[in-house]
Image (cartoon, helix red, strand yellow):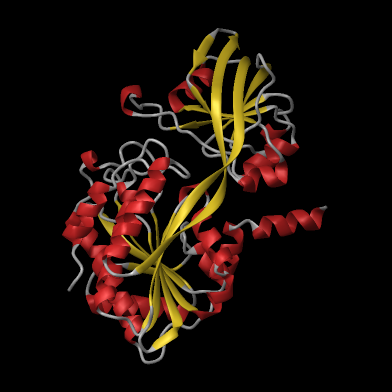
Amino acid sequence: MNVSAHRAFSLLKDLAFERVSCSEAENRAAQRLLAEAQSAGVQAVIEPFTVPCGRVRHAKLVVTEPYRKEYEVTGYERALSTPEGGVDLPFYYAENGLPAHLGNVKGKAVLINGHLGRKAYKHLQKNGAAAILTFSGSTIDRRSETDCDIRKLREMLTDDFGKNIALNMRAEDAAEMVRRGAKALHIELTAEDYDGESRNVCAVIEGTEKPEEIISFGAHYDSVYFSTGVYDNMAGSVIIMELLRYFAVHKPARTMKFNWYGSEEQGLLGSKAWVKAHADELDKHVLMINVDVAAATLGQNAAPVLGTDAATAYVDGLMREMGTACDVKSDIYSSDCIPFADQGIPAVNLYRSGTAGANYIHDRRDNLKSGYIDERALDITLQQALFLARRVDGAKVFPIERKISDDIRKKVDEYLFKTDKKQEGEKQ
């Protein structure tokens, strides 16, 4: 038996629906992945974990001065609700939140550019912003073809800096507000918090020669709102399912664990939960291979390696030997490889990203109808993953040192905000 891109793409088609964290659709996808793994004769289970969730009952934004107009908005999940009847606030556009702007945000509804990251949120909170506005999309979007993003105030913001009222709107509406000189807003937001249940699908194939050494494979199967997530990341999920099918027949020398992570889009919550739950076995893990985004027809292949320079050179040599173009580099990648590297486990993240104009991610265009992914392109990453897996598993002595370079460690710490929290603690 060999791997089959056609079979993998057929499974992808069956799972091409929105699979948001803790939703019934995410659960349905988890059950299907479980059944697929079990049908291959592999021991598999679902491991549930708790996710801090939120729902928005009502969100409203009206410009009241110097003109009056209501704009479409979505409330941030887990944001602070306004008092009954809403709040009336002065409006201020803080652009990128540089010091020249931060002195003007106190007591105001503040619009900023882009996503609400930790640094921006920290400064807005410390400088007394009364509400925070963000925007998504582009100023030339067609409303009939796009959505107003639904976002969340994640715990890495609120746990350290508290909650605030937060809304998201369309880029064209934000531009109109600034262009027309909006001075005052009426804002209403009714939100509530709750704990949801997400799931990791976990399968294991015991090694025949070195069972005490574990190679771990991972891919996340959840999507964001409005997206079927076929590119990000059902493509990666079906690729590691094919690897499972292969090694279920061609028994590996080393133990192999296959994990499909839920709630990755909420901040790598599935892989973080898995690493925490399996802390007693992590010293046996010698490598983590993650696949996140694949199958783009027009694109390029890459493999960030979270390990040492020697590990990067080894993976680069394998890709060259295989003869498939791949940009192998020593770097981190924003996916489920991060929690493993944080525990000192080397990781390789294989992906094929779509090129500009043929790359739709985190919106409604990430679907099969967009026609920008195909099974031939999926097979490129599938074959790379199989080649890498077979070579490292078949090695007499494991070829990648269980070590993370200082540079990668620094990047992982920065990604997980460990550096920020250390600095914040020193300043207190």
The quarter of the picture where the N terminus appears is bottom left
* Residue most extreme to the bottom: 396
176 to 424, vertically: above or below: above
Q: Nearer the viewer, residue 222 or 133?
A: 222
Q: Is residue 181 visible?
A: no
24 to 148, vertically: above or below: below
Q: Is residue 66 left or right of residue 224?
A: right
Residue at 50% x, 55% y is 48
Q: Is residue 51 left or right of residue 6?
A: right
* Residue most extreme to the right: 428
* Residue 358 locus on image (x, y percent): 26, 45
* Residue 307 locus on image (x, y percent): 49, 74
Residue at 28% x, 43% y is 357
Q: Is residue 289 left or right of residue 16?
A: right
Q: Count every numbered label the image shows and give the total.
A: 0
* Residue 398 locus on image (x, y percent): 41, 86
Q: Nearer the viewer, residue 95 or 304?
A: 304
* Residue 46 locus on image (x, y percent): 44, 58
Residue at 21% x, 54% y is 9
Q: Quadrant of residue 425?
A: bottom right
Residue at 83% x, 52% y is 428
* Residue most extreme to the top: 67
Q: Is residue 20 visible?
A: yes
